[in-house]
Image (tube, helix red, strand yellow):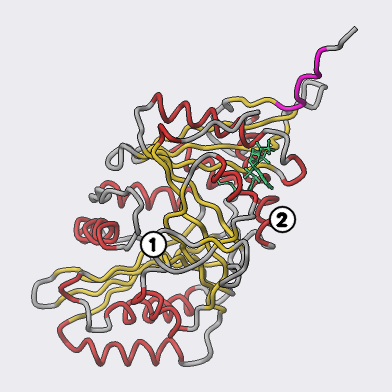
Amino acid sequence: MTTAPAPPAWRVVEPPRADSLDAPDAWTYHGVAAVERAVALADLGHDDFAPPAVDVLVSDRHQEHARRHRLVAVEDPGDGGTPRVVGHGVLMLPVRDNRHLAVARVAVLPSHRRRGIGGALADRLRRVALTEGRTTLFAEVEFATEPAAGAPDAMVPREGDGLVSADLPGMRFARRAGLGLEIVACRSVLDLPLPDGVAERFAAEAAARAGDAYRVHTWSDGVPEEWLVQYAALEQRLTEDEPNGGLDLEVERWDAERVRTEQVKLAEAGKTLLVTVAEHVATGTLVATTELIDSHDRPELTEQESTVVLPEHRGHRLGMLVKAVNLREHARLRPEARRVSTWNNETNGPMLAINVALGFRPAGGSAELQAPLDQVRPLAR
Ligand SMILES: CC(C)(COP(=O)(O)OP(=O)(O)OC[C@H]1O[C@@H](n2cnc3c(N)ncnc32)[C@H](O)[C@@H]1OP(=O)(O)O)[C@@H](O)C(=O)NCCC(=O)NCCS
């Protein structure tokens, strides 16, 4: 007599939504954060960039600019208790722009890999993306170190510099699904505090080059209402100008409302924003901006976000000026911070040069992958 194969010990479900981290259904958010933390510790050796539960909650709560379709793979404890999340998948679907895109993230606990969980999650996300009429799939695989040039596993992106190991589980998985490697984005980290006087010196040198035509403003309590429209224009500009290789990306549409939403999300996630902008005095126009984000939960960590200088105002050291002034103010306001991390894609030479001059050192990165959705292959066994 043959016995039927045992059903898998896990199942994929659409999790309930909860309004707070204390709600009974908030196990999803805690579970997703625990998976991401375990994956980061195993694959990257640290959890600096793993989203805490509150980030997961806030991204589900605010879907004004991107809807989220979330799945979790769970094991049931058998006593009717809370399911244990062993893997998760999320599809991000932009709403205002890039409506052809579906951005997927799948992660599985290291202890539960190679059992088909990631494939089951990815296949369901792929079907959702198709049903939603999306045509391009994006995914990202993070890594701790680049392979050496010429190493047998080193994979070269279609555009730009940077290498990624083709043997990473995420790369094997994504390639098996038919995704191609477009660009490699690199992360860099700046250790804090900076030696005495460094931020001041860079700020002074850059200010001398920029001259009186520009003045800087630093905001530690959100972008003032009267600057929101111009600030939104700079955010949009960043998405126009950032070199993205062959990634099938449209310009993002930013307006004052979108900036407000982002600021509400940061506040709800217990984060603070420090912004320095440069104003062109003669026209009252904002021409450069940079942002640092701090989190109450991890005061030792700071994230360097969007930096942009309008093309017609480049060549006056405004990128360095706003960054150095922001770091100087940050040292005063957040003396407990120990490192700043940032992203650059490897094709963005000018921004890398500023970061290197400030003392940022390479700290891994991510492979940016894409495929036309109708060419993505199912993974389930
Ligand atoms: C990538 C990841 C989600 C895969 O999860 P998983 O549950 O192990 O995936 P599956 O068991 O469904 O694997 C599906 C197929 O992918 C390929 N694959 C996955 N991991 C692999 C590995 N370590 N080595 C070789 N192939 C691998 C295989 O072809 C596998 O099929 P097979 O086991 O029948 O050979 C998991 O390794 C992970 O969480 N990595 C970190 C996060 C990440 O990089 N995510 C991918 C980008 S969204």
- In percent of width and height, residue 152 lies at 62, 64
Quadrant of the drawing holding the C terminus: top right
Quadrant of the drawing holding the N terminus: top right
> Is 311 located above or below residue 62 in the figure?
below
Apparent side of residue 82 relative to residue 329 in the rendered image (left or right): right
User: Is residue 349 something that shows in the picture?
Assistant: yes
Q: Name the residue carrying label 2.
A: 42
Apparent side of residue 180 relative to residue 192 in the rendered image (left or right): left
Query: Is 268 in front, or is 28?
Result: 28
Q: Name the residue carrying label 1.
A: 159
Question: What amino acid type should be assigned to the residue bearing mark 1?
Answer: Glu
Q: Which residues are magenta?
A: 4-10
- In percent of width and height, residue 149 lies at 56, 72
Q: Residue at x 55, y 53 (%)?
A: 141
Q: Residues within 10 Å of mark 1 (few under 14, many from 20)?
A: some
- In percent of width and height, residue 351 lies at 36, 74
Q: Main secondary structure of the magenta part?
A: loop
Q: Quadrant of ligand 1?
A: top right
